[in-house]
Amino acid sequence: MAAFALASSITPGPVNILVLSSGVHHGFRPSLRLVFGATAGFCLLLLLIGLGLHQLLDVFPQLTTVIQWAGVAFLLFMAVKLATASGELGKSETHKGPSMITGAVMQWVNPKAWLASIAGMGAYAANGAPILIWEFTALYFVICFASIACWAYAGAFLRRFLHDTKRIQLFNRIMAGLLAASAAYLILG
C-alpha cells in the first residue's frame, strides 16, 4: 500500500507541476495550503471510490468524459495563468498562493488521481472491507502530503536561483507548457 501511494503521489503530474510553481512563486509555507488541499481532495476521492463511487461511473460512463474535459479545461486555464504571470515572486494574483480549494479541484479533474484511486482501491481494498478502505486512505494521506510537499520544497529551493524577472517568466512558461502538454495528453491519449 505504501509503495503504491508513494509511486503515484511523488511522480510528476499536473498537481505536482502546479505545486512546484507555487513553491517558486510563494515559498514553501504558503504553498502548504495547496499541498493540503490536493492531499485532502485526493483522499476524499480515494475514499469515495472505495465506498462505491466507481460504480456510478459504470452506470453513467459519460461522467468519465465530463471529468476528462473538465480536467483539460482546468489545466489549460492554469497554463494560461502561469504563462501570463508577471514574473515577480510573491506578487501574482494572490500573495498567499493558491488555495486549498484549488488543490482539491485539481485532484477531482485530474485523470491521474482517478486512475490511482480506482487502481489502488482495486488492488488493496477490492473486497470493500471498510477497515481496509479507511486504512488505505489514512496511509495515503500521510504519504501523499509528504510527496506533494517535496514538490513545494523543490520550488522554494529553486526560488533562490530565480530572482530575475526574465528567469521567472521562462520558468512560468516551461511550467505552463508542461501543464498544456498534460492537457494535450488527456485529449490525445
Image (cartoon, grey):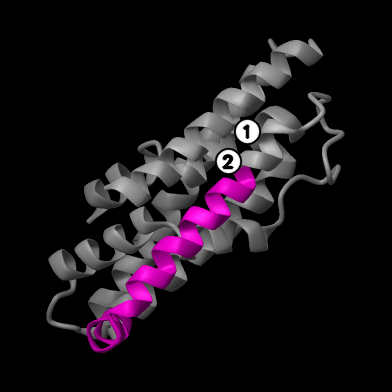
The reply, left or right, for residue 153 in relation to residue 26 is left
Q: Secondary structure at mark 2?
A: helix
Q: Amino acid at mark 2?
A: Leu
Q: Secondary structure at mark 1?
A: helix
Residue under the image location 27 percent in, 84 percent down: 130
Residue under the image location 38 percent in, 40 percent down: 10
Determine contact: label 2, label 1, CB under 8 Å. yes
**Labelled disc at residue 150:** none
Question: For residue 56, which quarter of the picture?
Answer: bottom left
Question: Residue 113 location, x and y as percent?
Answer: 37, 58
Q: CA distance from mark 2 to mark 1?
A: 5 Å
Dot 1 crowding, Cα within 10 Å, few <14, some 14–19, many 20+:
many
- Vertically, is 53 above or below 41? below
Residue under the image location 33 percent in, 83 percent down: 53
Q: Which residue is mark 1?
A: 21
**Labelled disc at residue 18:** 2
**Range covered by the magenta-colored residues:** 53-78
Question: Residue 103 location, x and y as percent?
Answer: 59, 56
Q: Is residue 178 magenta?
A: no
Q: Amino acid at mark 1?
A: Ser
- Vertically, is 29 above or below 107? above
Dot 2 crowding, Cα within 10 Å, few <14, some 14–19, many 20+:
many
Question: Residue 82 location, x and y as percent?
Answer: 67, 36
Question: Residue 36 location, x and y as percent?
Answer: 59, 56
Q: Is residue 74 magenta?
A: yes
